[in-house]
Structures are given as structure tokens and as C-alpha cells.
Image (cartoon, rainbow, N blue to C red):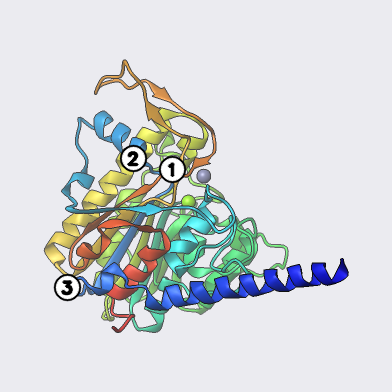
Amino acid sequence: MKKLLFLALLFAVAACHTKQVNDANKLENTIFPEDTIAFTPPKNIILMIGDGMGLTQITAGMYANGNKLNLEQFKFIGLHKSYASNDLVTDSAAGATAFSCGVKTYNGAIGVDKDVKRIRTILEEAEFTGMATGLVVTSSITHATPASFYAHQKDRSMMEEIAADMMAVDVDFFVGGGLKYFIRRKDERNLLSELANKGYVISNFIDQEFNDISIDFNKKFGYFTANEEPLPKSQGRDYFVQASQTAVTYLSSQQQKGFFLMIEGAQIDWGGHANDSDYIISEMIEFDEAIGAVLEFAKQDGETLVIVTADHETGGFAINPGSTIDSIIPAFTTDKHTAALIPVFAFGPGAELFTGIYENTAIHRKMRKALGFIKT
Ligand code: MG
Ligand code: ZN
């Protein structure tokens, strides 16, 4: 009996080993679609993430906006599979880490793989190669989506640790909430002083409105829009479109090897969690305005690849029978995220790389390919 068990175990180990070898071979022999497509390399990438923005969120925003969105100007469209390593339904941490690091990881992971190993992010790689970098978000700057581009922590809830990780990178331009994680900390560090020592000009919502600031383009710039999370658009938040525009102007004026900018419309997701279609729609329309501002730059510039996508859908949002263009009848299946395929819109040089259906991690590889980080 013991011998039998041993044999069974041995067989199981061997089978497991064979599977791993097969997986490795499969990866080695994989032909990536982006390796077979001719394209003009862009100088800059602007990645725009509408958190929780599934097709219905886009549709509802479009109808509410007079049946029109700036998103309609994108010619190259794909779909990504959003699942996490440990759950078919991803959260925003694993979802953003797939984009920033190119790995499927567990829900809650910030810039680490499923074994909690740090993975260099595309923002860090861009900075390393001499590009300027930026982040503009409508959440705290330490929230899961932006955090996944500069921080490496085992869980998204570690806001103070995530803020401290900001000291290890040099994001040239950032705008978002979360001031308190920088100044009222358990370790009593004052990260605002540390940023100032690193050459930043830092301002916040208490001292001046974002839209009133004149920015010194020769210094690194950071602005905190809230102590914790910024208000919804409908309650008076009004910096997002202008900050996106200013980020592009600032970053393109830096004499560096191009720039990488991540812009997040964070609260489309929060409208989904609240099962509040008006919340979703107002956030969606503002995100689309930011897209419009970015496209205007990209068209003139001609060297900028703009990618718009979401990490996942939120709410199982549907537009039910009886709806009209002027007034939709919304329905929701959940107040959590769902696992539907997620659209990817691309514009500018390298946009061809983003058609098709692929894993969320492929977006990372396609961006690296576009920027020439992968030589093949
Ligand atoms: Mg987010
Ligand atoms: Zn969410």
C-alpha cells in the first residue's frame, strides 16, 4: 500500500514537472502578434485607465453625452482578458499590475507577482531609459491603480508604505489625492519635505486651486487634490481635465527621451460599486473629456501613442429595455467587479499593435514593444 502511494506521488510529481516544462516550451515558442506587425515607434505613451469602465459604462456615457464620445475617434480596438492569477474576477491592484508589470498576480498585489516578488514597472523602466514620467488620477495617488505603476507592496491597503515608495522613483509630474499618507504617518516621516529635498515643487488643495497654479517646468511637480479621496465630479471636483492637459504640456516640454503618462478616471468604478448610473455617467463623460484633450495633443504631436482601457468592469451594469438615448433604465447584477472582456482603444504610432483579443498582461508587452524596450 505504502509503495503504491509512493508510486502515485512520484507520478504526480513527474506529471507536474512535465506540465511546467511544457508551459515553458509553450512560452518560448509563442509568436507574439506584436512581433509580426510593422509599425512606426512612438516617442511617448499615454495610458488612460477608466477604472471599472466596461462597454456598458462607455455606452451609457455616450448616450448621455448626446450619442457622442471622443472615444469614437479611435480606429484600432481590441479586447483584453482581465482575470487575476487567483480569481477570474480581478481587482484594480492585480488589474493595474498586469498593465504595469506584465504579470498575472493575485488580487491586492501592487507591483509584485503572485509570489510577492517585486517586478520593475513600465514607468520605472521608462524613467530608467531617460523618459519623463507622469501620473494624473481622480483617486488618491496611493490608490491601487496609480500605486501599481511605482510601488511594490504585498497589499493595496498599505497606503503609507505605498506613499513611501514614491520616494524611490522620480515621477516628474503627479496630481491626485492622498495627502495624509505623506504627512500624518505612523513612522512620523514627512514625505513632503523629502519630496522637496528631491527637487519637487509640491502644492495642495488647501493652499491653491489646481487650475490657478503656474507651474515651473524646470522642476518636478506634485499636487495633492484631497487629504484622502477626491470628490466625485458631480460634487465639484474640477481639476481632472486640466491636469491631464497640463501633464501633457509639461511632459512634452521636458528635454527627455519622450514620456510615459498614466491618467486614471478612478471613480467610474466607484459609481459601479454604488450601483449609481448617474455617478458612472458623470465620471465617464469627464474621463472622455480628458481623452479629448489628450487626443488633441496626440494629433498635433504625431509621435504619441494613446491607449485607453479599463482594468475590469464594475457592477454588471446593463441598459435595460425601455431605455431611450435621453434616459436609460439601468440594471446591475452586483456591487462588485465582473469578469467580462474589456475594450482597448489605441491611437497614434504603434496603435496597430492593440487589435485582437489578448491577456491584460499583453498590454504591457505591446507598450514595451512600441517603445523599443523589446528588441526582436
Ligand atoms: Mg483605480
Ligand atoms: Zn472597484
Residue picked out by circle 1: 313
Residue drawn at (30%, 63%), measured in percent from left and top? 46
> Residue 155 appears at what percent x and percent y?
63, 60
**Depth check, front residue: 182 or 307:** 307
Q: Is residue 296 left or right of residue 210?
A: left
Q: Is residue 20 left or right of residue 279?
A: right
Residue picked out by circle 2: 55
Q: Secondary structure at mark 1?
A: strand
Q: Which three-letter amino acid code belongs to the residue tagged 3?
A: Ala
Residue drawn at (43%, 25%), measured in percent from left and top? 331
Q: Secondary structure at mark 2?
A: helix
Q: Which three-letter amino acid code belongs to the residue tagged 2?
A: Leu
**Depth check, front residue: 203 or 156:** 156
User: Disc 2, disc 1: CB below 8 Å?
Assistant: yes
Label 2: how many Cα within 10 Å (few below 14, some 14–19, many 20+): some
Mark carried by residue 263: none
> Residue 220 appears at what percent x and percent y?
40, 73
Residue drawn at (30%, 19%), measured in percent from left and top? 323
> Residue 97 appears at what percent x and percent y?
49, 63
Determine the CA span between mark 3 and mark 1: 32 Å
Residue 220 sits above or below residue 237 on the image: below
Q: Is residue 264 left or right of residue 42?
A: right
Quadrant housing residue 159: bottom right
Residue picked out by circle 3: 38
Determine the CA span between mark 3 and mark 2: 29 Å
Q: Earlier in the sequence, mark 3 or mark 2?
A: 3
Quadrant (top left/top right/bottom left/bottom right) for the C terminus: bottom left
Q: Earlier in the sequence, mark 2 or mark 1?
A: 2
